[in-house]
Image (cartoon, helix red, strand yellow):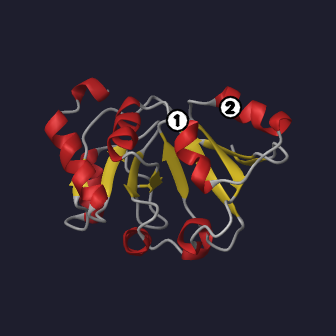
Amino acid sequence: MAANLQPRKLREATQVFRHGGLIAYPTEAVYGLGCDPLNGHAVERLLRIKARPLEKGVILIAADFSQLLPFIGKLPDKLLEPVLHSWPGPYTWIFPAAKNLPRWLTGAQDTLAVRVTNHPLCIALCRSCASPLVSTSANPGGRRPARSALAVRRYFKDELDCILHGDLGGQSRPTRIRNALDGQVLRA
């Protein structure tokens, strides 16, 4: 997967990230749309082209757990253990949000959805950007998530700044979402 990624294209995507642009990339199950989580204009633009309400919040993906630490609140070790055991992998967890996190990330909640990805291209992108990425499925609201770069292009035409081509991670459905505080499955 990541072996197919040309270094030039990764540099391009990193520059797009740093300049507040939008990137599409393959994830564990579908193509995702991403941007810098600390750039409110980029996140708002992403939500607008997806027709996704701000109140829903977003997911952040990261190359490793340390990239997520500035964005999440503390959890007791006994609650953190199953989360860390599931990562890296196709498991998204809802954490208490760090204090003063921008509303464009949390939406109407005081929580944040996060994942340490095991997709090699996503890992390479997060490492190259030295940051987690906002990651939401590449589809306009109410449409099926894109499973190819071509489908992304058909949905969004020229509204994206960079599309990374690559293989999906082999999952048939978007990642499971669980609450880290109680283990409750919110999306199977």
Q: Secondary structure at mark 1?
A: loop
Q: Quadrant of the N terminus?
A: top left
Q: Residue at x 35, y 35 (%)?
A: 124
* Image location of residue 11, percent across then percent down: 20, 44
Please state which amino acid type lies under the numbered disc 2. Answer: Leu
In the image, residue 141 above or below residue 4: below
How many callouts does the rendering have? 2
Circle 2 crowding by C-alpha within 10 Å: few under 14, some 14–19, many from 20: few
Q: Is residue 12 left or right of residue 53?
A: left
Is 146 placed left or right of 89 in the picture?
left
Say which element carries label 2: helix
Q: Residue drawn 44% across and 61% down?
A: 143
Q: Is residue 178 above or below residue 101?
A: above
Numbered tag placed on residue 64 in the rendering: 1
The alpha-carbon separation of the residues under discs 1 and 2 comes to: 10 Å
- How packed mark 1 is, by other alpha carbons closer than 10 Å (few <14, some 14-19, many 20 or more), is some
Q: Which residue is mark 2?
A: 84
The C terminus lies in which quarter of the figure? top right
Specify the quadrant of the image occupied by residue 159. Answer: bottom left
Between 144 and 34, the residue placed more toward the observer is: 34
> Is there CB contact under 8 Å for labels 1 and 2?
no
